[in-house]
Image: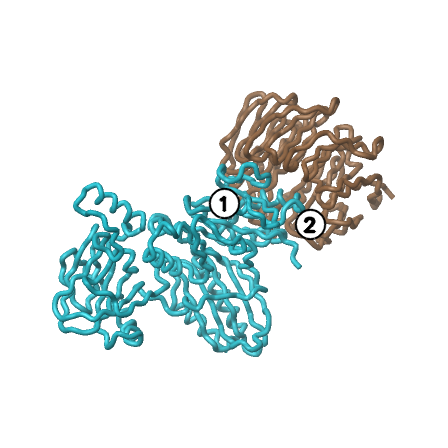
Chain colours: A brown, B cyan
Amino acid sequence: MSPPRTRLAKRARLELGDYPVDAAWTADGRALVLASGEGEILWWAPATAPAPERLGQHSGGALALAWQGAGQHFASSGQDGQVWLWDARDRTHQVLSESAQWSEQLVFASHGRLLAVASGRELAVYDGCGALQARLPTHPGVIAALAWRYKSSELVAVFNGGIRWYRFEPAAQSRDYPWAGACLTASWSPDGRVFASGLQDGTVHFWYLAADENSQMKGYGAKVGLTSWSANSRYLASAADAMIVVWDFSGRGPEGTRPIQLDSHTARLTQLAYQPGGTHLASGGRDCRLMLWQPAKGSDAIDADLLPDEIALIRWSPDGQSLLVADRSGALTLYGLERL
Amino acid sequence: MSDRIPVTVLTGFLGSGKTTLLNRILSEQHGKRIAVIENEFGEVGVDHELVIGAQEEIFETANGCICCTVRGDLIRVLGQLRKRRERFDYILIETTGLADPGPVAQSFFVDEDLKEDFELDAVVTLVDAAHVRRQLADSPTAADQIAFADVLVLNKTDLVDAATLAAVEQTLRGINSTARLVRTERASLPLDQVLDVGAFDLDRALSVNAAFLEPPRPFEWAGLYTLPAGHVKLHTGAHESAHDHGHDHDHDHEHEHEHDEAHEHGHGALAAVALLVLPAAASDAAALEATVEAATSAFEDTARPAASGTHLVPGTLYQLQLGHSAHFDLVLPKAGIWAVFTEHHPGEFGFHVHGEAPALERAFGSHHHDAEIGSIGIADARALDPNKVNDWLSYLLQSRGADILRMKGVLNFRGEARRYVFHGVHMIFEGKLERPWGEQARMNRLVFIGRKLDRHELEAGFESCIA
């Protein structure tokens, strides 16, 4: 029996008028926090208030946003070197940190109790109320990405020269997994078995942390700047240049198997995101195309849309039923997934 | 038209005047909105909203390929700046004095993000005229920064005398024969000399300096003297030098002071220098030229060490031991015209022939102290076979890419009305057919700048490309 066909249906639209740097869904999926190139932090609830509410502004531009799991807080950072922790209930914020280094990586653990902030080579971990829990300054390289293990207090930081694993509860522990290459992305399979990173040298590296094994997948023509796991932990999607490569971790794979290649994009990919709780994969690129795939079912896109400018952001709602897509000009489109 | 953002890379050792130049660029009215990425925090206009600090980070590959080495910090920071594209129209990257310019330049050709969004305009290297020779002796990075440059800004020229300045320029030209050389005091120069240079733009005319095209010589200077038979005194050192500072040498304090000053001028770095005297037929340029080949082969001999006071004879290569000051007795069998060849410019070690000025003198380029890094040029009118050129350059880049820092050229392909222009950074190569030759004489011109370059190997390779 063939699966029901799915398509993207436009539900709402917003002209931000500025580069959309980051966006984060609220836990209930009813609103989004947006960060702009000029540093504005905005609140957008498309169903109830079509115009966004301005919450504040990082001088010099925004860098990142993160929502607190099922909680009511979110964090923002900017080129002013500051990290702010916001309370969504009264829309106020406190300054968590300020440094000469930018804090480009902000990630809440899925349980929401811990927030990891990377600033240059330093990692700081705060609790959900903004109290500093740990400051870890001695990474071998600038931290390029962070990922928490799902429903856990384990974190991995990646950098030029390998990765470092941490556990923060009940007691702090860490372990290095050196690798001679510049790791760029951090993706932990939802089941926690495999940690994957895309590298500057055009490879993807897998670490099976519990088994203390690792493997390297080559054959990419360019740096691998995007990685995303399917919700069932079976597939890892990765992108280099205009090509999407999906590795199947079922059976003996992916080592020694041929990956699925999705090659309909005509320019470099900028966004790649598997659907939470589902099997769809969304991708966007400099070719201004948004594409929806189901890699397990085939290598043709199941739907696509052409935007006015290159795709800057793709963010799935927590329930996996809505998709925020922003292009470089600042046009935001909210899509719903419709079954035909 | 390209909408890529132009980038100038500013390199130079500590104290060379980078900060002064940067502050000038930021404060001057030039109609550009410039974002600055600094690897050294602090001194540059802190109020300027577009000054961004970044910690230098080198990304190497597992296979150790030097040509794939890029700067992670620049990729990251420029990626963020791209999101505020409309707020500026030029980017200036200031590297630390110790930074290897190779990975900085390569990032713009190797990394997909940078390649698409940014355009390397030029590598500008500031050179402290008073200290550069010492820096070259102390650190290989100084030579790399000079070798990589498209523009050499020779700064603080007011702090050295004319002879030292000439010697410094010789040294710079020996390392990098093709860079535009601009002399300044206090980093004061028209900004169009450092911004919008278009050094990597193949569409702009490739200007290759003609001076480099002659083969390099193992000596930097030659002079013709009319001398009597018998003993002639040669002097070296700050003491009684050609540009005597007029201090009282019997006074201890003054003596020390002068010693320090000599260091400042870069003379002090030379411990020994090779010298050769040969007979010449006349005191004109042709006669001097006629001795150059013989001198070149004589310089391949092992030099005989000569301490102060040693008697020297024509035809023997000596290694003069330079103290604070030294003198040597040149013993000549007959009166006549004599050519004196010195490894370094006389101004660098205070050389002069007692009571005599040269009737004619000439400086030679393409020579650097350790001969480790330098430029080699080839000029040849014969038409080339494009396939053979492709084979040669591919082989060259694969086998010597790590040593070739920069290369550029214009080629005359047989049967092709247009000129073929190319440039390269390590193994990265870009080339294309450009505008027609038209009235201009069809002439191949190639320049290689790098380490341990072998002229014979390069010439043989070029020869294999003749159509």
Q: Tell which subunit mark 1 falls on.
A: B
| Residue drawn at 23 percent across, 51 percent down | B246
Q: Is residue B136 left or right of residue B126?
A: left
Element class at badge 1: strand
Q: Position of residue B280 (x, y in %)?
A: 23, 74
Q: Position of residue A79 (x, y in %)?
A: 61, 36
Q: Position of residue B376 (x, y in %)?
A: 41, 65
Furthest toward the left, the residue is: B230
Checking the image for residue B58, the label placed there is 1
Front residue (pair A258, B163): B163
- Quadrant of the rendered image containing residue A12: top right
Amino acid on which disc 1 is placed = Ile
Checking the image for residue B278, the label placed there is none
Amino acid on which disc 2 is placed = Ile
Name the residue tied to disc 2: A260
In the rendered image, the vertical position of residue B145 relative to residue A251, given as above or below: below
Distance between the Cα atoms at labels 2 and 1? 33 Å
Q: Tell which subunit mark 2 falls on.
A: A
Element class at badge 2: strand
| Residue drawn at 53 percent across, 76 percent down | B440
| Residue drawn at 51 percent across, 40 percent down | B44
Mark 1, residues whose alpha carbon is within 10 Å: few (<14), some, or many (≥20)? Answer: some
Q: Are the residues under badges 2 and 1 in a single subunit?
A: no
Judge whether residue B430 can be spotted in this image: yes
Front residue (pair A322, B252): B252
Disc nearest the viewer among 2 and 1: 1
In the rendered image, the vertical position of residue B301 relative to residue A123, given as above or below: below
| Residue drawn at 52 percent across, 55 percent down | B122
